[in-house]
Image (cartoon, helix red, strand yellow):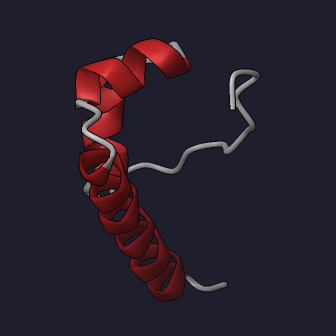
Amino acid sequence: MNTSEENKFLIAFGKNLRLIRKSKGVTQENLANVMGIEVSQISRIERGIIRCTLFMHPLS
């Protein structure tokens, strides 16, 4: 995947994450607490600025 494709993917992923999070009534703060990361990281992921590692939460 080249840089342009990766950027498009990150932006699309972030938009989908935001849509799903909001549809479930979860705040960025709630999600960050569950994932054990800073709220600012959720914001940057949703804006497609940073990559993240996906994992299955043990409560899912």
Eyeballing the image, is 14 above or below 58? below
Quarter occupied by the C terminus = top right
| Number of numbered labels in the structure image | 0
- The x and y percentages for residue 46 are 30, 52
Looking at the image, residue 5 sits to the left or right of residue 30; the answer is: right
- The x and y percentages for residue 59 are 69, 22
Rendered residue at 24%/48% (across/down): 22
- The x and y percentages for residue 1 are 67, 84
Rendered residue at 33%/44% (across/down): 24
Looking at the image, residue 47 sits to the left or right of residue 58; the answer is: left
Of residues 31 and 6, which is closer to you in this image? 31
Rendered residue at 37%/56% (across/down): 20
Rendered residue at 56%/44% (across/down): 52
Of residues 14 and 56, which is closer to you in this image? 56
Of residues 47 and 58, which is closer to you in this image? 58
Eyeballing the image, is 8 above or below 27? below
Looking at the image, residue 57 sits to the left or right of residue 50; the answer is: right
Instruction: Determine the image quadrant of residue 19.
Output: bottom left
Eyeballing the image, is 24 above or below 3? above
Looking at the image, residue 10 sits to the left or right of residue 23; the answer is: right
Instruction: Determine the image quadrant of residue 38.
Output: top left
